[in-house]
Amino acid sequence: MRRKAMPIVGAAALLAAALFATVGHASSLSTTAQSLGAGKSAVAKCDADGVTTTQVLTVNNVTSVTIAGIAAACGTATLSVTVNNNAGSNSTGSAAVPGGGGSMTVALAAGVPMKDSDQVDVTITGP
């Protein structure tokens, strides 16, 4: 009985040693701004005070989103919108920000059924 247990204990010890040997690799990643990997770097903002969003409904589906309060400094950037109804449905859309900022409406690729709680994410990339 002891001879059969020895290989299992030995294999378990080797597995544990291999797992513990790989844990320390993440600690060697750099966190300076010159590194991409796990480092961090400041991101310039074209709109410091944020924007407001209004979901546009067609029957019970969110079909587009109106974004207002876009700073003029964001003009010609690409604005992307994602709507997620937290029930498995989501859709995205994107468009160019008008030259002077202001407001714009972005159509979604597909309508998202309206729920009690929807999540709207807005990303402005550029200019």
Image (cartoon, grey):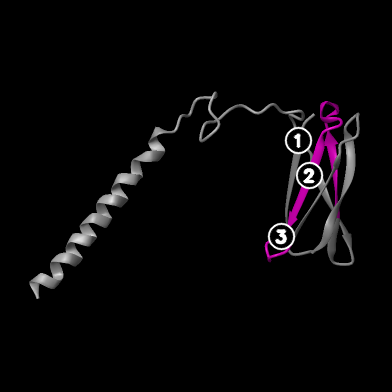
The span shown in magenta is 64-89
Q: Examine the rendered structure and indicate whether residue 95 appears above or below residue 6.
A: above
Image quadrant holding the C terminus, namely top right
Place residue 25 in its image quadrant: top left
Three-letter code, disc 2:
Ser
In the image, is residue 20 part of the stretch drawn in magenta? no
Dot 3 corresponds to which residue? 117
Q: Secondary structure at mark 3?
A: loop
The x, y position of residue 109, in whole percent, is: 83, 56
Residue at x 20%, y 66% (from the top left corner): 8
Three-letter code, disc 3:
Ser
The x, y position of residue 101, in whole percent, is: 88, 32
In the image, is residue 80 part of the stretch drawn in magenta? yes
Q: Examine the rendered structure and indicate whether residue 77 appears above or below residue 2.
A: above
The residue closer to the viewer here, 88 or 10, is 10
The furthest residue to the bottom: 1
Q: Are marks 1 and 2 in contact (CB under 8 Å)?
A: yes
Disc assigned to residue 80: 2
Q: How many marks?
A: 3
Dot 1 corresponds to which residue? 125
Q: CA distance from mark 1 to mark 2?
A: 8 Å
Image quadrant holding the N terminus, namely bottom left
The x, y position of residue 55, in whole percent, is: 83, 53
